[in-house]
């Protein structure tokens, strides 16, 4: 009998493809960044770039459907905040559950904030502040994840949706109650379903947030001329895409998601599937996409030791912010772009939230 020497053969070297792909990024990447000098040239570039991104995200393949809002439950929290658990139809047979956090004194002048969730927080539950659930409470403590609830306490109407693959939008019901899987999402599955049809996950998420704005306009209870969006991590990604492509967003806050693609998504290529849009890197980098938000008020939060910044750290962030600043300078709107840097790792920071929002709103 042959003696087993190990479960697998011993391999002393691996011959991977990363260096080759990094060279290809340098050769083929970012061929459509803005090269003009004037505001008029930028507007021409903006129109062309929005059309390009609309196609890359597969938004032309997503389908309109009646919203058909359904109220599942209404709870009045001790702070006087009314929490509505609703769902809307974003495509035929595709439903988005949402927590609406409505302050007691929210009238027609109240500003609605879309608050898309990131990863590892069970979707809307962390963002809406349901810390009574142990694992959700742990993530709120770790990431300061309850930014929807924080906004509601400041008097804003906070719209906290489940993005596709998270919370009540899992593909398998059994995963929603699993202690590990329940915090995470199904982006990998969604990418496998959508990308071969030309619909990356980022496109699905952007479409759903656009439909959420449609719902707010349909409901008509608050100031839909001042719709805003705030998100952390994967929620920051959604905020960037939505604000770049939908000018109904008048103010944006992107936290924990702003860096160059090469360092953070090519070199660190095990990030979630929702980050990857086929052919995107050939055309643009992250700063180029976010430039479409100019000159609307925009706050970006970065953490100096956030591992998602990549091996060059905060320098990878600064490069993209400089691309943004150039766009805001064209509009003489430099004060409308704020960049906060905090010490420590991947985390949302609310220390100066009221002051920063007050300042940005004055500029809007």
Image (spheres, rainbow, N blue to C red):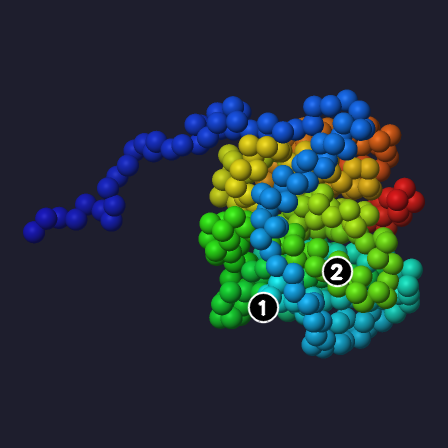
Q: Residue at x 58, y 48 (%)?
A: 58
Q: 149 above or below 298?
A: below
Q: Residue at x 65, y 52 (%)?
A: 206
358 relative position to 291: left or right: right
Q: Residue furthest left?
A: 1
Could you tell which of marks 2 and 1 lies nearer the N-terminus? 1
| Disc 2 element | helix
Q: Residues within 10 Å of mark 2 (few under 14, many from 20)?
A: some
Q: Quadrant of residue 322?
A: top right
- Position of the C terminus, as image quadrant, is top right
101 relative position to 166: left or right: right
Q: Quadrant of residue 34?
A: top right
Q: Position of residue 164 (x, y in %)?
A: 59, 59
Asked whether residue 313 is in view, the answer is no
Q: Residue at x 85, y 71 (%)?
A: 80
Confirm or deny contact between disc 2 and disc 1 (CB under 8 A). no
Q: 332 above or below 355?
A: above
Q: Position of residue 27 (x, y in %)?
A: 52, 23
- Residues at marks 2 and 1, CA–CA distance in whole angstroms: 17 Å
Q: Position of residue 256 (x, y in %)?
A: 67, 44
Q: How many marks?
A: 2
Q: Position of residue 297 (x, y in %)?
A: 82, 42
Q: Quadrant of residue 128?
A: bottom right
Q: 44 above or below 163?
A: above
Q: Residues within 10 Å of mark 1 (few under 14, many from 20)?
A: few
Work out whether residue 18 or residue 49 is closer to the camera in this orientation and state it. 49
32 relative position to 77: left or right: left
Work out whether residue 294 or residue 154 is closer to the camera in this orientation and state it. 294
List the residue tagged with mark 2: 214
| Disc 1 element | loop
Q: Residue at x 59, y 27 (%)?
A: 31
List the residue tagged with mark 1: 93
């Amino acid at each position: 009998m042959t003696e087993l020497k190990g479960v697998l053969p011993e391999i002393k070297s691996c011959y991977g493809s990363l260096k080759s792909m990094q060279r290809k990024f340098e050769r083929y990447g970012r061929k459509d960044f803005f090269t003009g000098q004037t505001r008029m040239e930028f507007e021409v570039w903006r129109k062309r770039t929005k059309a390009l991104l609309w196609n890359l995200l597969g938004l032309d393949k997503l389908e309109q459907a009646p919203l058909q809002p359904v109220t599942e439950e209404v709870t009045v929290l001790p702070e006087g905040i009314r929490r509505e658990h609703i769902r809307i139809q974003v495509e035929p047979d595709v439903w988005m559950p949402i927590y609406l956090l409505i302050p007691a004194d929210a009238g027609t002048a109240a500003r609605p904030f879309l608050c898309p969730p990131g990863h590892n927080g069970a979707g809307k539950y962390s963002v809406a502040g349901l810390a009574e659930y142990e694992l959700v409470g742990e993530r709120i403590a770790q990431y300061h994840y309850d930014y929807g609830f924080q906004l509601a306490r400041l008097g804003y109407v906070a719209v906290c949706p489940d993005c596709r693959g998270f919370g009540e939008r899992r593909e398998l019901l059994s995963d929603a109650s699993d202690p590990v899987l329940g915090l995470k999402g199904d982006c990998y599955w969604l990418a496998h379903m959508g990308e071969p049809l030309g619909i990356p996950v980022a496109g699905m998420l952007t479409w759903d947030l656009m439909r959420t704005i449609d719902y707010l306009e349909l409901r008509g209870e608050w100031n839909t001329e001042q719709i805003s969006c705030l998100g952390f991590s994967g929620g920051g990604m959604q905020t960037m895409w939505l604000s770049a492509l939908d000018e109904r967003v008048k103010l944006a806050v992107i936290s924990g998601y702003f860096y160059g693609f090469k360092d953070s998504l090519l070199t660190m290529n095990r990030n979630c599937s929702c980050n990857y849009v086929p052919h995107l890197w050939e055309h643009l980098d992250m700063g180029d996409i976010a430039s479409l938000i100019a000159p609307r008020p925009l706050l970006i939060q970065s953490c100096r030791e956030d591992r998602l910044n990549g091996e060059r750290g905060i320098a990878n962030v600064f490069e993209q912010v400089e691309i943004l600043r150039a766009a805001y300078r064209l509009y003489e709107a430099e004060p409308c772009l704020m960049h906060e840097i905090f010490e420590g790792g991947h985390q949302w920071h609310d220390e100066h939230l009221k002051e920063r929002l007050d300042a940005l709103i004055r500029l809007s």
